[in-house]
Image: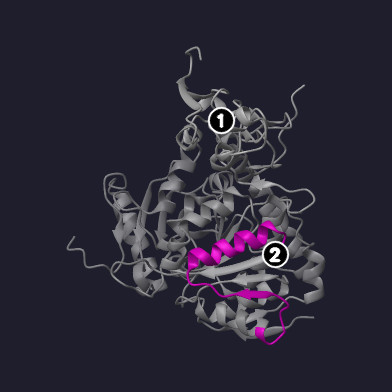
Amino acid sequence: MEKKDDNISAMCRPAVGEAGKTGDWRDMRPVIDESKCIPAVKKRAACFLCWLYCPEGVIRATIPVEIDLDYCKGCGICAEECPAKAITMVPEGDKA
Amino acid sequence: MSNVQIMTGNTAAAFGAKLCRVQVVSAYPITPQTSLTENLSQAVEGGELKAEFIRVESEHSALTVCISASSVGARVFTSTSSHGLLYMHEQLHWAAGSRLPIVLCCVNRGVGAPWSIFNDQQDAVSQRDTGWIQIYCRDNQEIIDTVIQAYRIAEALYVPVMVCYDGFVLSHTMMPVDVPDAAAVDDFLPPYKPHTILSPEDPRNINPVIFPWRRPDAEGVLRDGYMELRYKLQDTLEEAGKTIVSVGEAFAGIFGRNHGGMLWTYRMEDAEIVLCSMGSLATEATTAADMLRDRGIAAGVAGIRVFRPFPRKEVREVFRRARAIVVFEKDISYGYEGALCSDLKAAFYRSDVAAPIHNVIAGLGGRDVKARELAEATVAALDIIEAGQADEKRQTWLNCHTGN
């Protein structure tokens, strides 16, 4: 059963996804080539400029680097900033 | 025990705010509101009122401070006039949309261009559609009593209330005012319980972007879209009349004065000709009605106290026996007619009230309006109505050299 919204003004708890699945706004998807990505190649924590620059905070500084596509809006800043040119923006709907 | 003092309307409003123990005051001085703000500033400075007086650089900021303070649970007060109110326009919408029980005194003044510091009601009437309750007072006693009632209404409904009264005519005119007992006001007005939650342990996002559609939030609760929240405000305003009337009655039970709930009437029992207005102009109309009665015209007055929510049901009842209606007002909706006149006509649509209506625009920019002139304007309006020209004839502009 659906829970009723008793608020009389717009109010919510800060949480991942409180603004909805903003990833469905995206029309270009970032795809990482792990043969070029510096932390993946060096197998240690390094670079992570994509994580630093992502304005949505949806990139995790892990090995390999992960992008949460539920909330990535496809702005392409990560691809622009990547010094190894490891990230390509691919039109949504196309196969990577 | 009565405590009657002689005071101006602005002093009465300040007394009202102090008796409500407001915790935050933020206001920017503007004629004719200034002495109200000065009074509260002095009361805070002197320690008489335990509140924060927050000085700001503009009315937009004054209301923004009130919105923030009200969100964290403070009882807040502000006041302004004319251009100050218009400068608040955006924040008026934010206050109502956030459902914050702010009380604002609008000391009614005309709007430029050209510059005028004098009284009419164009300022408040032009903010009619911002989601605020609007109450128009007719004398200084009603001002102090209405400020106190306004907090109880606002905090019961979570809707901001604008207490409007005429600049200079009331704001700077001294009258006897019975100041309510502070302990009795404390009993009448329970502490404000905010609906907004602000706590570092349990944080909230307040007023995030709302999409057109409804959607589940991260916790799975289906959240209102923009239209659902707008509807909740409209529904509350539509039902607010009951609260306004019951708060007025509860106030009368303690303090012995009832200013009429949504509207008040004067000599209406057998009235055939009804004069209708808001604020001090309506008070003046009662004297005009007496003069008309002396001339054998069965005149009465209906004073609209609450303009929003509009007293649709009440005016249909009160005007039922009217044979002719003359609406006097200190505002104009350019290109059409006075806003009160339009709203009354809309309320009468497909009701028992079918009397012809003539609109008289009076006292803009402080032009003096005498009771005798209202009586004469009523007689002239009756001539227009009897000639069958009520529908095609434009409003009358009282004492205005229009060339017509």
On whether residue B93 falls in the magenta region, the answer is: no
Q: Percent from the top left, x then y, of residue A75? A: 47, 33
Q: Which residue is mark 2?
A: B75
Q: Chain of mark 1?
A: A
Q: Residues within 10 Å of mark 1 (few under 14, many from 20)?
A: many
Quadrant in the rendering for residue B143: bottom right
Please state the extent of the stretch shown in magenta in the rendering.
Answer: B45-73
Q: Which residue is mark 1?
A: A72
Query: Is residue B67 among the parts visible in the rendering?
Result: yes
Q: Percent from the top left, x then y, of residue B34? A: 50, 79
Front residue of B25 and B201: B201
Q: Assign a secondary structure to mark 2.
A: loop
Do discs 2 and 1 share a chain? no
- The amino acid beneath tag 2 is Arg
Q: Chain of mark 2?
A: B
Front residue of B232 and B61: B61
Query: Is residue B276 among the parts visible in the rendering?
Result: no
- The amino acid beneath tag 1 is Cys
Residue B170 vertical position relative to residue B350 in the rendered view, above or below: below
Which residue in the rendered view is the most extreme toward the left?
B403
Residue B75 vertical position relative to residue B4 in the rendered view, above or below: above
Q: Assign a secondary structure to mark 1.
A: loop
Q: Percent from the top left, x then y, of residue B150? A: 65, 61
Figure quadrant of the N terminus of chain B:
bottom right
Q: Percent from the top left, x then y, of residue B278? A: 49, 61
Front residue of A93 and B147: A93
Q: Which mark is residue B234?
A: none
Which residue in the rendered view is the most extreme toward the top?
A95
Figure quadrant of the C terminus of chain B:
bottom left
Quadrant in the rendering for residue B229: top right
